[in-house]
Structure formats: structure tokens, C-alpha cells
Amino acid sequence: MKTLAVILHYNTPQYTDVLYELLEADRDKFDTDLIVVDNGSDSGKESKYNTYKLDENVFFGGGLNAAMDLMMQNEDYSSLLFLNSDLIVGKNFISGLRAASFSHDVSSPCIIQPEKTQNHWTQMLPWGSNEIRNVEWIDLQCPLLSRKFIRCLWENRTSENYIDPLLIRGWGIDVYFGILAKKVKMQTGICDNIPAVHLGSMTLKALGNTNEYCRLAEQDMYEFFNKTGLMKEFIDMRNWAENYKV
């Protein structure tokens, strides 16, 4: 079975094009398809590798909705690799993550982040275990999601799409995935031996007015967990991450 790898692009071709070329040079074309989904970029700021273009910027959650739709429409795909555009990856990146998907329905590389302020969730850092660490939830710079998990997400949806409109800006999707995976007894893991460098929310910065964006995203996130009755689970998951150690 194949993996669909999707880079979500918005206004930063200087990052997207580099990531695409790194992945394209390394991927096994028999087991992975690689595409770029443009999230409503301004004219002249598209990636030269664009495959699909959304009519408007629907933020991180809307881009993830679109990627999951594309993946689930093709029965050949057993998993979705969803990538922020501002990542740097090494050799055997996709093949290593695909190996993880045989034991985990939600998985991620470990993340190295040059900006200190981006290192908040320490479970994402490399801890030197050289294996797949079981964790409660992953930050979503580069998740690999199984078809089984995405189907479960659809069956437990709280709106007409996979991602609730209150989570469309991206805040809280990661913890919600962890809560759902735990509920249905699916494994979540981080590959300590497969790193990715995250350059520091370059797409968010490209949106402009980041303080207002973050304020609205956080406000909507808390409203979602209150609405769904999952606030206790949300707080427990965040506390777990705040105190994470191997």
C-alpha cells in the first residue's frame, strides 16, 4: 500500500520548493506519491511544484481537511504524510516513517527547532532512544496518519468535515488527535531516529498579524474542548506534555 505525502504551501516558495526537492530525490516512487497543496497563496508566491490550489486560505486545519479528502478518495493509499512547508529532512525520511506506520496509526519524526520559543512540547525533541517512543500525542509539523485513524476521525467528527471549524487555525488538533487515538486504543509514536528540522512557523509569519491569529486560534481551541466535553482530557494531555521525560 502507498503513502500520499502532501506539503501544505502558503506564500513561501523558498521553503516549499526546497522541501519538495529533498523528498522527491529520496522517495520510492512505487510506494509514495508526493504533491503540493496550495492554501490560497497570493499571485506570484506559489510553489513551482503546485499540484492543487485551494480557492482561499483555509488555514492549517482546512488544508489538512483537503489532504485527508484527497488521500481517502484513493484506496491505494494506506497513509497520509502531511508536511509543513518549512521543514528540512534527511535521507530515507519517508521510508523510515513508513516503517513506523506498521506499528503506529499516528506517528511523527522527532523535531529539531532552531527557535527556542518553538521547543515547548518536549516530547517532540530527539531523546536518543533510537526507536519509536510511545507518546500520548504529537505536535503536527509532520504527522503520518493511517487510513484507519483518518476513517476513525471521520466517524467521530464534530462537524461536516474531519476538522471542526473551531480548530481550523490549527491550535488543538494535535491534542484532539491524541485524545481520539487513546479512546479507540490506537498507538501514537515519535521516531527518535528520524529527525526533521522545523525552521520556525514561517507560514504563520507569512500570514501577518500573528498575535491576533494566535489569540483567535487559542480562543477557538478552548471553545471546542468546552463544546465537546473534552476539557478535562485536554488539560490532562497538556499537563502530560509539560512534564514529559523519557
Image (cartoon, rainbow, N blue to C red):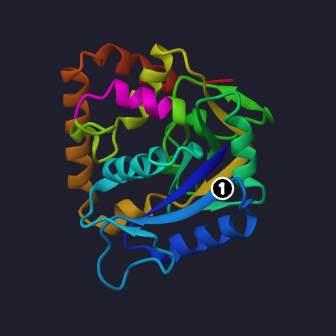
The spot of residue 59 in percent (x, y) is: 30, 55
Q: Few, some or many C-alpha atoms within 10 Å of disc 1 (few <14, some 14-19, many ≥20)? A: many
- Identify the residue at image location x=41%, y=16%: 236
The answer to whether residue 246 is seen in the rendering is yes
Give the residue type at disc 1.
Thr
Q: Was residue 210 drawn as part of the magenta stretch in this picture?
A: no
* Residue 42 placement: quadrant: bottom left
Quadrant for the N terminus in the image: top right
Residue 119's place in the image compared with 30, above or below, is: above
In the picture of the structure, the residue carrying the numbered disc 1 is 32
The spot of residue 136 in percent (x, y) is: 54, 23
The spot of residue 74 in percent (x, y) is: 50, 48
- Identify the residue at image location x=34%, y=64%: 39
The answer to whether residue 112 is seen in the rendering is no
Quadrant for the C terminus in the image: top right
- Identify the residue at image location x=70%, y=38%: 191
Residue 140's place in the image compared with 199, above or below, is: above
Determine the residue located farthest toward the bottom in the rendered image: 44
Magenta residues?
149-159
Determine the residue located farthest toward the right in the rendered image: 130
Q: Nearer the viewer, residue 59 or 202?
A: 59
The reply, left or right, for residue 1 in relation to residue 84 is right
Residue 31's place in the image compared with 97, above or below, is: below
The spot of residue 100 in percent (x, y) is: 71, 36
The reply, left or right, for residue 166 in relation to residue 80 is left
- Identify the residue at image location x=64%, y=73%: 21
* Residue 174 placement: quadrant: top left
The reply, left or right, for residue 170 in relation to residue 7 is left
Question: What's the magenta bit mostly, secondary-structure-wise?
Answer: helix
